[in-house]
DNA sequence: CAGAAACGGGG
DNA sequence: GTGTACGTTTCTG
């Protein structure tokens, strides 16, 4: 049996002989390989898809399930918690992941069934959660090397295929060294926006954190950073060769999901070139994500930095120029998009400028990647979902998948994703926001700022704001532990046992601790631990890594205060959302009053902070 | 005025 | 594919 230590770059599953096979894409150190690393695709056929059923009559439900076609592979009775109420539930194992969407409605419609759970968790995500495996971390694999496998077409001698005999084990979450390559296209588009049917690619810029930095073009023979080839076809082929030979782990672009990759795919198709850059030899694919696409290469992480930047900083515009200026304070070389064809046609100095611009674009894109990807990598390791997915998820989704993982750890059933109807009705209810005091006109000096951001997570923890400990006014399906305990013990409603929110009088039991306050509590204490380590260490590299780690945890904690009000959130609760802001308003007003007693005059307040000035007498 | 459609980024 | 963005601005009836 072979033992391998790999960095887990990506994961998916394929179907082989009617069974689901998980594929783990990774790399391992290998001094004999050209770039010092070998590629590994590990196969695991032992993982099975399942859902949970909340039955009102377990026996009857077991009978009903026998009539399903195809019949489930296994039906077991398991102990889980539902909003902290311990109970017996049915775990139904299927023969294939696709049977879940096929059969779940039929199961849900049985009279013996109250609800189904965890039927909306993609198979590869379930695998990561249940095996306690984190993408971009180092994992240990045990299995045997096989020569070939049906879905793996790559003939790369640097690739090994491993058939797993045991589940993977996480061994280290240290920062892996990653080979990052950025790319960018320039197109000759004389009439409006580029049209891939007629406007040819004139330059392909490539930069990297290894020794490749060039522009591939049909012109520019006299420039040392230009690789001149004699056709657009050769440009595309040289691009593919460069990416493949350099063993990149990550390929980055700017708006490459929607421009560069679709464009190069269209142009390559004209010459019958296959963009088969996947680790398994598969082609570039576009994954539907809502109304837009994500360009995906199996085992070669494509990250679109435009999407990352929109989460990383808050700006009114996200052009590459603007984002670069905000981060580095430097202006980029600029060529107006509608004049690129003139620079190309005019040759001479303008052509040289265009080459400089092309190189500058791709060098800047790489610089953005090096600046921002460490945070995304940390979030990947905390949330535990693929890097590709994390960089394309809204922050609320990142927090949600973190909670899904934690729910599994707490043996709690995960609430369902809301239906379209639920989502739109939720959009009509909205919590009153934060307190706003209109600013006083004039120029003020001696200002002090009070920041409340960190107070929101504190409110959730100290007031135990969580749907599983909220005393329900109308008992519905989300009946929880508090309602149950009151009923069982015939308790009178005693206000001493609750934290009661201002304005709405929502009652949160003081015990037990809610699921979400517990998770946020752990996030905050983990962050404090890292901050302490950060202060103690003298090693600048370690300090930098710890800083990113605590920043990722801070972002996660701060996301969670607003998330109760997001219409698509699994743990959505308007009562929780409105209570947090109501307590927030109470605290901010109280603090402003206190400040005024100490001689501060408040000038302006908004939601999570206020400005005041000190007036000596 | 409300609901529908377009937009962002890219050249 | 255990699937189908998203929040905001502008247009249209």
Image: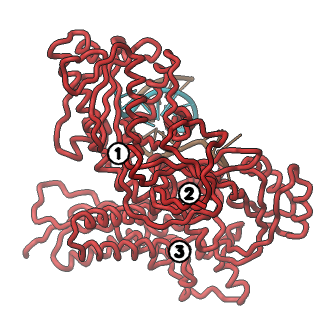
Chain colours: A red, B cyan, C brown
Q: Report the residue at 25% width, 68% height from top.
A: A450
**Which picture quadrant has residue A286?**
top right
Q: Which residue in the protein does label 3 denote?
A: A505
Q: Position of residue A85 (x, y in %)?
A: 68, 77
Q: Report the residue at 52% width, 63% height from top.
A: A140
Chain of the residue on which disc 1 is drawn: A
Of tags 2 and 1, the one toward the viewer is 1
N-terminal label among 2 and 1: 1
Q: Are marks 1 and 3 on the same chain?
A: yes
Disc 3 crowd, CA 10 A, few/some/many (<14, 14-19, 20+): few
**Which picture quadrant has residue A601?**
bottom left
Chain of the residue on which disc 2 is drawn: A
Q: Residue furthest front?
A: A32
Q: Which residue in the protein does label 2 denote?
A: A569
- Rounded to the nearest angstrom, the CA distance separating label 3 from label 2 is 23 Å
Viewer-closest of A244 and A502: A244
Q: Report the residue at 13% width, 71% height from top.
A: A614
Residue A263 visible in the picture: yes
Q: Which residue in the protein does label 1 denote?
A: A309
Q: Position of residue A314 (x, y in %)?
A: 32, 48
Chain of the residue on which disc 3 is drawn: A
């Amino acid at each position: 049996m072979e033992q391998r230590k790999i960095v887990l770059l990506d994961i998916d599953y394929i179907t082989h002989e009617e069974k689901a096979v998980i594929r783990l894409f990774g790399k391992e150190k290998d001094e004999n390989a050209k770039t010092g690393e070998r590629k590994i695709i590990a196969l695991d056929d032992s993982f099975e898809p399942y859902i949970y059923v909340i039955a009102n009559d377990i026996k009857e439900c077991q009978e009903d399930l026998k009539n399903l076609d195809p019949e489930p592979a296994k039906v077991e009775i398991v102990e889980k918690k539902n909003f902290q109420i311990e109970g017996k539930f049915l775990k139904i194992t299927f023969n294939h992941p696709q049977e879940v969407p096929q059969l779940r409605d039929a199961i849900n419609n049985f009279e013996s069934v109250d609800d189904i759970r965890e039927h909306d968790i993609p198979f590869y995500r379930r695998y990561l959660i249940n095996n306690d495996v984190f993408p971009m971390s180092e994992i240990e694999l045990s299995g045997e090397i096989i020569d070939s496998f049906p879905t793996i077409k790559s003939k790369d001698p640097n690739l090994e295929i491993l058939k797993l005999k045991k589940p993977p084990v996480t061994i280290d979450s240290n920062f892996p060294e990653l080979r990052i390559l950025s790319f960018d296209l320039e197109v000759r588009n004389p009439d409006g926006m580029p049209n891939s049917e007629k406007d040819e690619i004139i330059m392909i810029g490539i930069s990297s954190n290894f020794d490749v930095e060039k522009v591939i073009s049909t012109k520019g023979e006299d420039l040392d950073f230009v690789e001149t080839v004699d056709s657009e076809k050769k440009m595309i082929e040289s691009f593919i060769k460069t990416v493949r030979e350099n063993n990149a782990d990550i390929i980055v672009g700017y708006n490459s999901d929607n421009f560069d990759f679709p464009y190069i795919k269209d142009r390559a198709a004209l010459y019958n070139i296959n963009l088969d850059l996947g680790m398994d030899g598969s082609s570039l694919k576009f994954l539907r994500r809502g109304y837009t696409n994500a360009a995906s290469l199996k085992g070669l992480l494509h990250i679109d930095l435009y999407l990352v930047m929109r989460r990383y900083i808050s700006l009114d515009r996200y052009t590459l120029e603007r984002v670069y200026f905000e981060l580095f304070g430097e202006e980029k070389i600029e060529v107006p998009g509608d004049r690129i064809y003139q620079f190309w046609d005019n040759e001479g100095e303008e052509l040289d400028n265009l080459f400089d611009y092309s190189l500058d674009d791709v060098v800047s894109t790489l610089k953005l990647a090096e600046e921002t990807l460490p945070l995304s990598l940390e979030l990947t390791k905390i949330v535990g979902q693929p890097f590709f997915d994390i960089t394309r998820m809204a922050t609320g989704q990142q927090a949600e998948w973190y909670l899904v993982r934690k729910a599994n750890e707490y043996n709690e059933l995960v609430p369902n994703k809301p239906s379209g109807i639920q989502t739109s009705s939720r959009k009509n209810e909205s919590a009153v926001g934060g307190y706003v005091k209109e600013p006083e006109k004039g120029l003020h000096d001696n200002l002090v700022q009070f920041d409340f951001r960190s107070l929101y997570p504190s409110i959730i923890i100290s007031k135990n704001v969580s749907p599983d400990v909220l005393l329900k006014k109308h008992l519905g399906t989300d009946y929880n532990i508090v309602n149950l305990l009151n009923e069982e013990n015939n308790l009178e409603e005693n206000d001493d046992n609750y934290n009661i929110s201002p304005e709405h009088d929502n009652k949160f039991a003081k015990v037990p601790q809610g699921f979400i306050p517990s998770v946020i509590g752990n996030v905050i204490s983990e962050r404090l631990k890292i901050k302490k380590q950060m202060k103690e260490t003298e090693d600048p590299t370690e300090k930098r890594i710890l800083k990113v780690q605590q920043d990722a945890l801070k972002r996660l904690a701060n996301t969670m205060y607003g998330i109760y009000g997001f219409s698509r959130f699994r743990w959505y609760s308007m009562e929780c959302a409105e209570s947090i802001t109501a307590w927030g308003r109470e605290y901010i007003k109280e603090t402003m009053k206190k400040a005024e007693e100490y001689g501060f005059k408040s000038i302006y307040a908004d939601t999570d902070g206020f400005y005041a000035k000190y007036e000596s007498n």
